[in-house]
Image (spheres, rainbow, N blue to C red):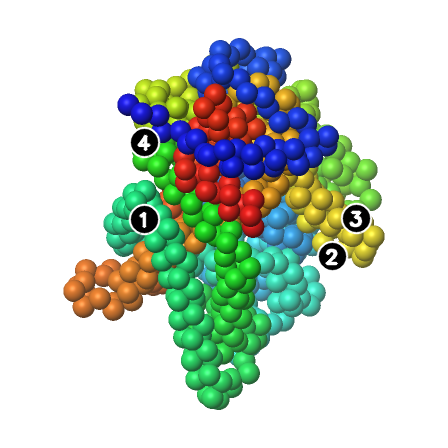
Amino acid sequence: MPSHHYTPDNSTVHSEMARKTDVPSLYYGEPRKFDPTFRGPICNRSCTDLFCCVIFVIVILGYIALGTVAWLQGDPRKVIYPTDSYGQFCGQKGTPNAKKSTLFYFNILKCANPAVLINLQCPTTQMCVSKCPDKFSTYTDVQLQYQITAAPWDYYRQFCKPGFNNPTKPVAQVLRDEDCPSMIVPSRPFLQRCFPDFITLNGTLTVAKRTHFKDALDTARSVTELRDAANGITGLVDAKEVGMKIVEDYAASWNWILIGLVIALVVSLIFILLLRFTAGLLLWFTIIAVILVIAYGIWHCYLEFSLLRQQPRADVTIVDIGFQTDVMVYLQLSQTWLIFLVALGTIEASILIILIFLRRRVRVAIALLREGSKAVSYMMSTLFYPIITFLLLAVCSSYFAVTSVFLASSGDAIYKVMAAEPNCMYANKTCNPETFNKTNVSKECPGAQCTFAFYGGETPYHRYLFILQLSNLLIFLWLVNFTIALGQCTLAGAFASYYWARRKPQDIPPCPLFSSFSRAIRYHTGSLAFGALILAVVQMARIILEYLDSKLKGSNNVAARFVLCCLKCCFWCLERFVKFMNRNAYIMIAIYGKGFCMSARDAFCLLMRNVVRVAVLDRVTDFLLFLGKVLIAGSVGVIAFFFFTHKMPIFQEEVPTLHYYWVPLLTVIFGSYLIAHGFFSVYAMCVDTLFLCFCEDLERNDGSSEKPFLMSAGLHSILRKTDHH
């Protein structure tokens, strides 16, 4: 069989030699010399970054130990189920609370923040009840009515402490001892907790059709106080209602969603197969199709905007109507279509500008993608490797989530003294509810109670739970980045073996994907872990900065927020740079089998010596692949839109009845994009690998019969176009 490598004529060789003399090697290292024994990834290898590999293995074993200890110490019920003031779970079988699954707060006005409620740290008595109150009443009213009829007391007492049945006890003593709540208001259960049932009447927030009321001490209260005490709960309740409808929509349309995702899978495969034979035609068709689709969207948005502007109350804005569960309400606003119009116009203009100023680069990138499609066609198994990456990421994410929950629920019930008087010396001191009545605390602090506070402990394990949670997060980020690095190195090794094969496909090694995966695991686990750790530390720093930023929101310290904003920007740029360098370092590791630091240095120098070509590869090819993903997701989305909106006469009877048609529609569009992204990420890795191999080939060889190029004639034409333009 004849060789398929490319040998240019003498003029081309001389031009290549002249080009190499212009390389700024003083700054970015010397180009590699010809090595007749070099065989690409198929070479003698040894373990790299062994120390980091050992550390990585030890950390994984420690992570398993941490998960085991958390599993033994933790109880997820402490996080999932609410706990009353006695440390008992609401709704737990085999307890007096078996039929009482909802938590009721005696004085919700003491809870100034919804997060306090969810974390069970509100300084008021909490009882498990079978249902939330559905009427407004005060203890004083019930006490007065008890002289006439016992019915109101029989209803009210179910929200008092178990066993309390003394409606004649003075009000002041009842409230001091917190035997009963001072008042009850209509509430609805959410997150297994009773929250006030806010209702808006004629634009006014009310509870039980009241805006003002008095508690048992005849103190004037307003519904605004209740709203402030449960700030954001109304939005959460609305979100719950929307969530229930969304779940119902998924239950009714899940089979059609799966069909849509299967269609996206088939379309993605067909698209990739067509790239093998009609790369140029297909990519130009993709570009033109995306431009035309966006143009149609601009025209449609302009028509809707013009029609709505002519209708009454056209100046109503999104802010004016606030949050609405019915998305169709927003589509009746001219401002919504104006936002769509501006967004689509900006996208269209950006695409046109890129095509006008980078049209030559686009042709070069298309040729590079055409070469990549050949490599993919010889190793079709690489297209399905993202499934392995997805499964590994799912395992890491599940383990992280479970460990986090068990860590958060570790510890024993801690009880503290809750004093009715502010000057009590025993306030917030740890106590034992079984022996509390025998102490002098009740005598010195009348009305004081020993109530459940939180779960914790005094052992070193419990004292360092926060540190363990941070360690859990850092190791999770490390494992996620290692999984991604393993996939990149595996694919790079497979595609590099294609490039450095002198005769294609005869010299491509058997099972190139499995061989590359084996090499990466056996020899380069330490190097991949090293690069993943660097990226994980940067991401951890970004998470901490985001946390600090959320804490500083609303703060008047402008200088601190400015510094924090600058740090966030810097670390975002650093993360992007580290990702870019890691990706290319993994490619060099797959080719040469060197350590991470040396591979990263070689990759950086090689890219800097070919910086013009990097500009072609890094943005233009990504742009073309992005357009392909948008086209696939958009085409499947259009089909799904016509189906779920009953605009396909053939399937009229098959379309399920939905609350929100956009729920399955957005699911299909987003899922289709992820499927296309999975396939195209393999393509992107193939192009990046071929590009670095291409640059290495240019530096090692000169195209003569003694040092022939291994690139194809198509790749060599890319060289000439890039150099000339």
Residue 70 shows in the view? no
Q: Earlier in the sequence, mark 1 or mark 2?
A: 1
Residue 54: image quadrant is top right
Q: Residue at x 25, y 69 (%)?
A: 647
Estimate the spatial distance between the alpha carbons at disc 2 and disc 4, rounded to whole Å: 58 Å
Q: Residue at x 52, y 62 (%)?
A: 356
- Quarter of the figure that contains the N terminus: top left
- Give the residue type at disc 4: Tyr
- Give the residue type at disc 3: Val
Q: Nearer the viewer, mark 3 or mark 1?
A: 1
* Nearest to the observer: residue 647 or residue 197: 647
Q: Earlier in the sequence, mark 4 or mark 1?
A: 1
Q: Which residue is mark 2?
A: 554
Q: Which of the numbered marks, if any, corresponds to residue 306?
A: none
Please say if 629 is above or below 227. above
Q: Which residue is mark 3?
A: 563
Q: Which residue is mark 4?
A: 378
